[in-house]
Image: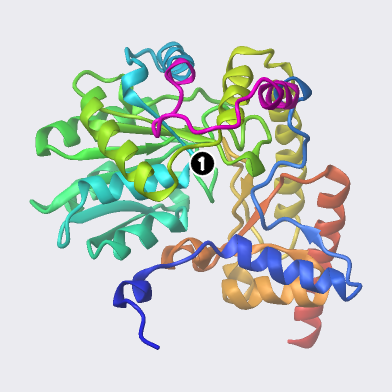
Amino acid sequence: MRYAERMKRLGTETAFEVLARARALEKKGKKVIHLEIGDPDFDTPKYISEAAIKAIRDGYTHYNPSAGYPEVREVISQYINSSRGIKTSAENVVITPGGKPIIFFCILALVDEGDEVIYPNPGFPIYESVIEFVNAKAVPMKLREENDFRLDVKELKSLVTPKTKLIIINSPQNPTGGVLTREDLEEIARLAIERDIWILSDEIYSRIIYETKFESISQFPGMLDRTIILDGMSKTYAMTGWRLGYGVMEEKLAKYVAQLGTNAHSCTASFAQIALSAAITGPQEESHKMVAEFKKRRDVIVDGLNKIDGFSCKKPLGAFYAFPNITATGWKSKPFAEYLLDEFGVAALSGTAFGHFGEGYLRFSYANSIENIKIALSQIESAVAKIKQNA
């Protein structure tokens, strides 16, 4: 059988592959600590689930507009306006089953074959995957540890060419936890306006931030019509399985993205959208408590990793990932991640799962309990001790 050539250009998200391997080991009786998947170990707040159950009983079980219910899009618009200090309407909002369709559909709608897209590396692997899938040129923007994993704006400028159609930014960032400053964003905005470039701003972790303030590039003059804000419910409200994301963008692009949605999935689940509205307008205490708990876990895992021989780890300012440097162990990232899982029952991701500039790093998700994080740290320490013993 023959398959389309484009499938050779499509990548994947390694977190799900490692999760499957870890589950298979568990079925064989091995105890595994899951630090591989970015899935908060909290229940969805009860008021959100109750809103979905009521919506089903009230008959929200049929088709709805491809862009989403207008009244729910208006709720999103009002939230975005108040949190980013901008002015949008329901016509700028498209609701999708998860955040990934916003990445996929916006790239499909904006980027032609031969165009160039600059994206963070190490970064969320779906960026590069979709860029290459549409036969555009993926241009990696290296995030450096010595720069707190913020992109270097001067280096970014050097990567821009007449073919640059889109720049992707992600702050707070997966996998590093780096956060772009207001000054960074202002310079990127100036560059985008000068060179007529779209910005896809992945802000999915905007509410999971610690010692600093979240800033959106959309706030700067001239950026509203060239910025796509990507956000969603998975991280903030522990709703990963609900598959609820949304994009906020220029009105014409919103229509194109909705049209692609019509072709791909028709619409996002009706009752889930009612729950989305309830989440945004309801009490936020549980989300705040979750972030406070993530901060405690961050401090435990970062302090613990920095005590392990051969490891050094920056303290992330946002998201819920630790990204330690392991070069001093003498091991490459992927073999080390596999060694931890197979021999010591700690599921983590290789830095190279997030691009080739991730070599020398591992990613640990601290969306797990402090008790399990401490067990994992002990196991990692044992793994390093065994390596030294066998050296």
Secondary element under disc 1, as helix, strand or loop, is loop
Q: Quick one: quadrant of the N terminus?
A: bottom left
| Region rendered in magenta | 49-73
Residue 39 in the image: x percent, y percent? Answer: 68, 46
Quarter where residue 230 is shown: top left
Residue 23 in the image: x percent, y percent? Answer: 78, 67
For residue 206, above or below residue 36: above
State left or right for residue 387 relative to residue 243. Answer: right
Q: Quick one: quadrant of the C terminus?
A: bottom right
State left or right for residue 157 relative to residue 184. Answer: left
Protein image colouring = rainbow
State left or right for residue 135 relative to residue 95. Answer: left
| Of residues 382 and 6, the one drawn nearer to the viewer in this rendering | 6
Q: Specify whether residue 54 is painted magenta.
A: yes
Q: Residue at x 62, y 47 (%)?
A: 321
Q: Specify whether residue 357 is painted magenta.
A: no
| Residue bearing mark 1 | 97
For residue 83, above or below residue 372: above
Residue 209 can be seen, yes or no: no
